[in-house]
Amino acid sequence: MSRKKKSRAVPVVTIIMLLTAALCVACFFADRFVAAQRKAASDDLARRQQEVIDQNNQTLADYAARIAELERESSTTASASWPAHRNEGWDLIDLTSYPLENPTAETRSRAQVLTGGMLLLNEWHSRPEDFSETALVSLGKYYGGNDKVQVNDYNVKMFPNAADALKEALDAARAEDLTHFIVTEGYRSWDEQNTMFQNRVNKLSSRYSGDALIEAAKKEVNYPGTSEFNSGLSCTLKLYDKDDPEVTNSKFSTTSQGKWMNENCWKYGLVLRFPLANWPLETTQDKSFKTGVSVKLNLYRFVGKGNAAVMHYMDFCMEEYIEYLEEHPHIALFEDGVLKYEIYRQYVGDSESFDVQLTRNARSWSTSLDNMGAIITVFEY
C-alpha cells in the first residue's frame, strides 16, 4: 500500500519540477521582455527629448539671427530725415535741429551718473561737493590678483567702469604681444591732493607769497579737487619688468607699448588726457591751452567708447569736446556708412534727480554728468 503511494508521488514531483522550470524560464523571458520594453521606452523618451532640445536650439538660433538682422538694420539705417552722411570712413553729422526719435525717458539721480566718465576736472572746474568715493575699487583686488595686469600696489584705485575699460585695453595689447604695462597711480583723495599741494606751497614760500605763491604751486601740482587724479577715472601707465631694468627704465611714449596705447586707447573708451605738441606722438596737437596742463603725463582718462570715438575723430581734448557739445548738443557718428553712436547733451542743472531723455532706437545707452550743468548721453547702435 505504501509503495503504491510512493510510485504515484514520483510523477507529481516531476510535474512540479517541470512546472517550476517552465515558470523560471517564463520569468526569465518576461524579465527580458520587460527590460527590452523599458529600454525601448527610454530610447524613445531620449529621442523625443533630443528632438525638443534640437527644436529649442533651432528656435533660439533663429531668434538670435533675427535679432542680429534687426540690429544690423537699425545700425545701418539712419533716419531718413537726418542729413546725408558719407559711406566711407568716419563721419560726424550735426543733429542739433533734430529731436530724439522714438523718445522715452528714465529717471536717474546725480549719484548714479556722477562718475559715468565725462566729469570735467581742471583748473577751472573743481570736483562737485556730492562726489563719493564709495564705489572705488583697488585694481589689484578687482583684477583678482591677475599678474597679467601689474599694479604698483593695492592703493591704486579707480571706479569699476574705468577699471574695466583699462583691462580691456591691456588685454587687447597683450593679444599683440605687448606686455609689461604697470598701473603706477590712480585715485587720490582730496586730503592726499591737499597734502601734495601744501608741500609744494611750503617749498615755494621763500620765493613767492600771497596769490603769486598759490599760482606758482598750481603750475606743478593741481589745487585739491581740480586734479584728474581726484576723479577716480584716470590712471598713469609705465612699463615694468623685475628682470629687465632696460624695460623698467624705458621712456613709455617711445616704446611699442606706449605707441600702441596712444594710437588705440580710444577704442576702449580711454583718452590721453593731456596732449602736448608732438607728444606723445609726432602728430599730436598741443592742447595745453585748453587743459591748463603742460607737463608730460602718461595719464589716461576713461570717458566711454562713444565719447572717445568722437574725441579721436575730431582731435578734441575733453574741454574742446564739451564745448563742441554745448554748441552742437545732438550729434551722430558713422563709420563706413554705419551708425555707431548718437550723442545727446541735456541740461539738468543742479537737480538731485532728472529724466534722462532717450531713444528706443538704440541698442544700449549710458550717461554721465559733465560738471558743466548737463548730462551727456551716448546711444550705441
Image: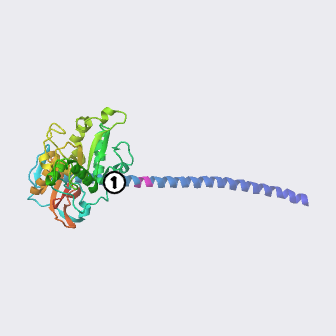
Q: Residue furthest right?
A: 1
Q: Residue furthest front?
A: 206
Q: Position of residue 193 (x, y in %)?
A: 25, 53
Seen at 13% across and 40% down, the residue is 277
Q: Is residue 339 visible?
A: no
Q: Nearer the viewer, residue 130 or 213?
A: 213
Q: Name the side, left or right, on which 30 lies relative to 226.
A: right
Main SS type for the magenta part?
helix
Q: Nearer the viewer, residue 200 or 362?
A: 200
Whether 43 is among the magenta residues is no
Rendered position, 225 above or below 172: below
Q: Is residue 196 visible?
A: yes
Magenta region: 48-52
Q: Position of residue 76 (x, y in %)?
A: 18, 50
Location of residue 347 (image quadrant): bottom left
Q: Nearer the viewer, residue 216 or 151?
A: 216
Say what secondary structure mark 1 lies in. Answer: strand
Q: Name the side, left or right, on which 74 lies relative to 162.
A: left
Which residue in the protein does label 1 denote? 137
Q: Nearer the viewer, residue 51 or 314?
A: 314
Q: Position of residue 353 (x, y in %)?
A: 22, 67
Q: Position of residue 176 (x, y in %)?
A: 29, 37
Badge count: 1
Rendered position, 344 above or below 262: below
Seen at 30% across and 44% down, the residue is 184
Q: Amino acid at mark 1?
A: Val
Q: Quadrant of the N terminus?
A: bottom right
Within-10-Å neighbours for mark 1: few <14, some 14–19, many 20+: many
Location of residue 124 (image quadrant): bottom left
